Amino acid sequence: MSANCLCGSSLPYVSCCEIVHQDARAALSAEALMRSRYTAFALQLIDFLYDTFHPSTRRFQDKKAIAQWSRENHWQGLEILRATENTVEFKAHYIDQQGNPAVHHEKSRFQKTQGTWYYVDGKELQ
Ligand SMILES: [Zn+2]
């Protein structure tokens, strides 16, 4: 893939989120992990999405539900609104199952455990 990465960076996928998709330890910040998780939704990388949940919240996750959410929507772009060391507020634009444009606006929390960033949970915002 030579086009710019789906996460909206100016880098090609191979120099951006693909590195993190191959090894989540390559995400050097919460924002980098957030971007790679968005791209994973767009590319339907379900195992990556599951594995990057923090171990404390992973058991509540359902791979089938993640796969369905990933597959049913057409991901159009990511907008990072605010990022701190361990939170990221973003808008993910997508076309829903009915073909309508929609926005998922969320403030996510991340935690670094043994050198690796994980997604803990998120609060949906309006
Ligand atoms: Zn990227």
Image (cartoon, rainbow, N blue to C red):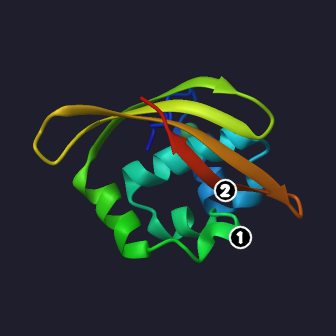
Residue toward you, 110 or 67: 110
Residue at mark 1 to residue at mark 2: CA–CA distance: 8 Å
Residue toward you, 121 or 31: 121
Vertical comparison of 31 with 21: above or below: above
On-image quarter of the N terminus: top left
Vertical comparison of 103 with 41: above or below: above
- Disc 1 secondary structure class: helix
Q: What is the number of callouts on the image?
A: 2
Question: Residue drawn at (54%, 73%), measured in percent from left and top?
Answer: 60
**C-beta proximity under 8 Å, tags 1 and 2:** yes
* Disc with the residue nearer the chain's start (1 vs 2): 1
Q: Amino acid at mark 1?
A: Ser
View quadrant of ligand 1? top right
On-image quarter of the C terminus: top left
The percent position of residue 77, horizontal first and vertical second, equals: 39, 31
Question: Residue drawn at (38%, 49%), measured in percent from left and top?
Answer: 42
In the image: residue 45, left or right of residue 25: left
Query: Mark 2, residues whose alpha carbon is within 10 Å: few (<14), some, or many (≥20)?
Result: some
- Disc 2 secondary structure class: strand
In the image: residue 16, left or right of residue 100: right
The percent position of residue 108, horizontal first and vertical second, equals: 61, 43
Q: Quadrant of residue 99?
A: top left
Badge 1 is on which residue? 56
Confirm whether residue 105 shows in the render. Answer: yes
Query: Mark 1, residues whose alpha carbon is within 10 Å: few (<14), some, or many (≥20)?
Result: few
Which labelled disc corresponds to residue 120?
2
